[in-house]
Amino acid sequence: METSWTFGRCLLLVEDDPSNRMTLAALLEDAGFAVVTAGSYAEAANLLTRPRAYDAVLLDQSLGDGFGTGLIPLVRHHMPKTKVVFVTGHDGKIDMPVDAVFRKGGHFDDLLAFLFKLLPQRPLGA
Amino acid sequence: MSGRGDLQARERAAVADVVASTLRHDLRNKLASIRNASFYLMRQMKKTEVWNTDPRVEIFFQLIEKELTSAEELLSKRSPPAVGGPKPHCRPSEAVERALSQANVPGGVRVQRELTEKAEVALDREDLAVLVGCLVDNAVEAMPRGGTLTVRTKDLEDDGVSLRVEDTGEGLAPEAYSRAFEPFFTTKPGHAGLGLSIVHRVALRHGWQVDVGAGANGGTFVEVVFTGPDVGPGSRLVGRDENQGSK
């Protein structure tokens, strides 16, 4: 779709719900991001140990075979510059060592604006 | 009301709370998928001729959006929190005794108490007894052939209080530890799998920490660490400085 600021940015989307994963990945790709998806804790843990620079990891908490919070140390260790966004359908207080929390159910445009603020600005093509 | 009926009523309320929360979470997930799919389709449709020739297409996308919004508003509705009155508080050891007095502990299970805390925590005694009861039931059910149930409470150096319930059952498979707090997750046939979810949910709400892991004697332990500004010395510092023996 748009935009210069998403060009060349790569996101890791960790979401065990297939419908959520598919639709959100489609919208993020349509917005210009490169998107890698993981449908389970094990799949995400495997991806996070490979050398790939993600601009942000979008983490769901309940992953069937583990908790999204369990992946945070892997991100911090292997990719210290990567932002961790906790994407949750829960409505309680979130007290986790993440860079940002986004509530599920919001408009995609809100998520896009949210990511725009979160990701550090950089010259096009950098 | 202070009998078994009160504890059961509170337990039912706690179960209903977990079930409602799980349903809200799952429905919110599904609504998010529908919203994202609809938004993607709308953007694709805008690129086609149909978007301009049939005005109902745009109206129907607006209708989907409107209904999703009202469904989410329904999910977010809450009863107002109770206001007024003193903040509830209790000593965990009192809640432990209350829970153990109501628990169904078979003869083959030995109960060992190590209750040494002096601080109070920010929860009504009956509500904390429900929480302890969930942990006790969970531990007892893990020992169908008998064993030792150990309940420990102690003050922590940094002002917190620890409550630890441990069994000597067969323990959990490694992958089960990460799922132990999920609603409806159970390794025991015929069980709803809500006990630890209730504990986890109450702990999350108060900012307390819950850990589950392999016990020193082969079973499983669950530890709740009560922290925060509402945890502190009680008004009645009648400490239990020694072990309380076994039941």
Image: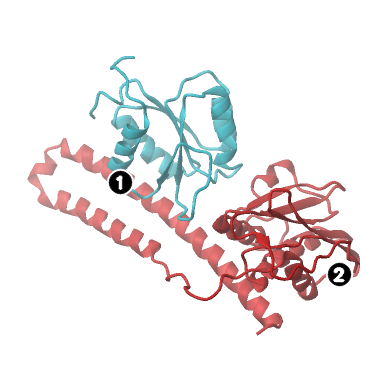
Chain colours: A cyan, B red
Disc 1 on helix, strand or loop?
loop
Task: Name the element at disc 2.
Answer: loop
Q: Does residue A43 show up?
A: no
Where residue B60 sits, quadrant-wise, is bottom left
- Give the label on residue B158, or none: none
- The picture places residue B190, in percent across and down from the top left corner, at 70, 64
Q: Answer with left or right where residue B161 lies relative to residue A13.
A: right
**Given the image, on which type of amino acid does mark 1 rest?**
His
Amino acid type, callout 2 = Pro
Residue designated by label 2: B106
Viewed as shown, does residue B100 lie left or right of B26? right
Asked if the residues shown at circle 1 and circle 2 are in contact, with their CB atoms under 8 angstroms apart, the answer is no
Residue B161 at x, y percent in the picture: 71, 56
**A53 over B104 or under it: above or below:** above
Depth check: give the residue in front, A47 or B50. Answer: A47
Q: Residues within 10 Å of mark 2 (few under 14, many from 20)?
A: some
Q: Nearer the viewer, residue B1 or B172?
A: B1
Residue where numbered disc 1 is placed: A107
**For the point 32% across and 24% down, which residue is it?**
A121
In which image quadrant can residue B201 be found?
bottom right
Q: Quadrant of residue B110?
A: bottom right
Q: Are marks 1 and 2 on the same chain?
A: no
